[in-house]
Amino acid sequence: MREIAFIRQNKEKWLEFERAIEQKKIDNPDDLSNLYMHLINDLAYAQTYYKKSKLVTYLNNLAVRVYQKIYQTKREESNVFVHFFKVEVPLLLYQYKRYILYSFSFFLIAVLMGVVSAANDDTFVRLILGNSYVNETLQNIENGDPVAIYKSGSNWGSFIGITFNNLRVGLMSFAYGVTGGIGTGYVLLQNGIMLGAFQYFFEQEGVLWKSAKGIWIHGAMEIFAIVIEGAAGFLLGASILFPKTFSRLNSFKRGMRDSIKIVISTFPFTIAAGFLEGFVTRYSNIMPNYVALFIILGTLSLISYYYLIYPFKVYKKTIPGSVKK
C-alpha cells in the first residue's frame, strides 16, 4: 500500500487517539488499550514499509503518549515516585530525544568557542571568569592546589549553597524556553563558553589534570544536568513555535507539562553533584588518582545511562515490536 493511502485509511483512528490523550479522564482504559494495540500494528507496518518517513516518528511518539495515558489512568504502579523515574520520564526522554541532541550539540559548540577564544586572546579568560577569580586561582596554583577555591567554607554550607545555585541555573535554563528557546540557548552558550575558557586556563598553566581531578568529581553530573535542563527549555520553546496539530495554547500546555517532568528528573543528580562538591571535592588534592577516576567515570556513566541509554530500553520494552531508531 502506498503511504498516502495508508495515512488516509488510518487518519481518523489516529486523530481519535489524539483526542483521547487530551482528555483529563478516560472512562474506560480498556477501550484505549484495545485501540493501542491497533496503533502498535500500524507502527510496525510503517516501520516495515516506510522506514525513512516522518510517519514512523509520528506513530512512535503517539504510541508513547497513549501508553503513558493508559498507565496513568490504570495506576498499575503502586509507587508513583518509582514509576515517574522508572517509566514516565524515560519515555518522555525517548520521545523528545532530538532536543537532548540539540542541547548537547549547542553546548559543545559553546565549549569549543570558549577554548578557541581563550587560546587566541590573552584577556579572554579574565573577561569571562573575572580578575578576582583568576588572581586567586593563580595563587592557588603556586601553592600547589589549583582547586583550593572549592574548599572554602563548611561542608554543609558549601553543599547547600552550591546545590541551590545549580538548581537556579538549571531552572533558569528551562524557564527561558518561553522565549522560543532563545533564552535557553543564551544560558547554555554562557555556561559552555565559561567551561571552555575555564579548562583552557588550567591547561595553559600546566595543571589540567590536577584541576580536572577535583572539578569533574562533581562536574560530570552538574554539567550533564544543566544540558538536560537546556533540552527541556528547547522543548518548551518548540511547543510554542511549532504547535503542529494542536492549538498553540494546548501545545504550550503539553510542552510545559512534559518539560517540567524532565527538569524534575535532574534534581537528584544536581543534589548529588552538590553533595560531592561540598563533601568530596575538597579532598581531591590528597585523593589517589584511581579513586578520583572511579568517582568521575562512575557518576558520568550513571547519568549518561539514565538519559541516553535507559530510555531506549524502556521504549523497546513498552512498545511491542518496536525497533531501535
Image: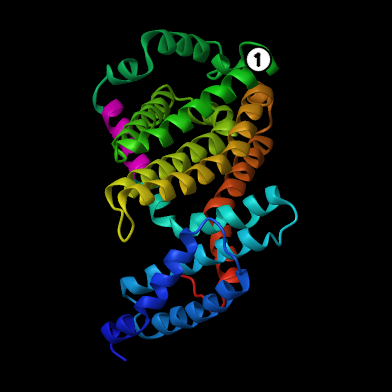
Colour scheme: rainbow
Q: Which residue is mark 1?
A: 157
Q: Which residues are magenta?
A: 106-119
What amino acid is labelled 1 in the image?
A: Gly
Instruction: Give left or right: position of 109 versus 301.
Output: left
Q: Is residue 111 visible?
A: no
Decide: is 300 above or below 76.
above
| Nearest the eye: 315 or 293 | 315
Q: Number of marks in the image?
A: 1
Instruction: Determine which quarter of the picture holds residue 216.
Output: top right
* Image quarter (top left, top right, bottom left or bottom right) of the C terminus: bottom left
* Front in this rendered view, residue 141 or 66: 66
Name the one closer to the observer, 154 or 19. Answer: 19
Q: Which residue is located at x 45 percent, y 78 percent? A: 43
Q: Residue at x 48, y 65 (%)?
A: 20
Whether residue 25 is visible, yes or no, is yes
Within 10 Å of the Cα at label 1, are there few (<14), some (14-19), or many (20+) other Cα atoms? Answer: few
Residue that appears at 51% across and 41% down: 263
Residue 107 is covered by the magenta coloring = yes
Q: Residue at x 42, y 65 (%)?
A: 18
Q: Is residue 132 above or below residue 42?
A: above
User: Looking at the image, which residue sits at the far front?
Assistant: 27
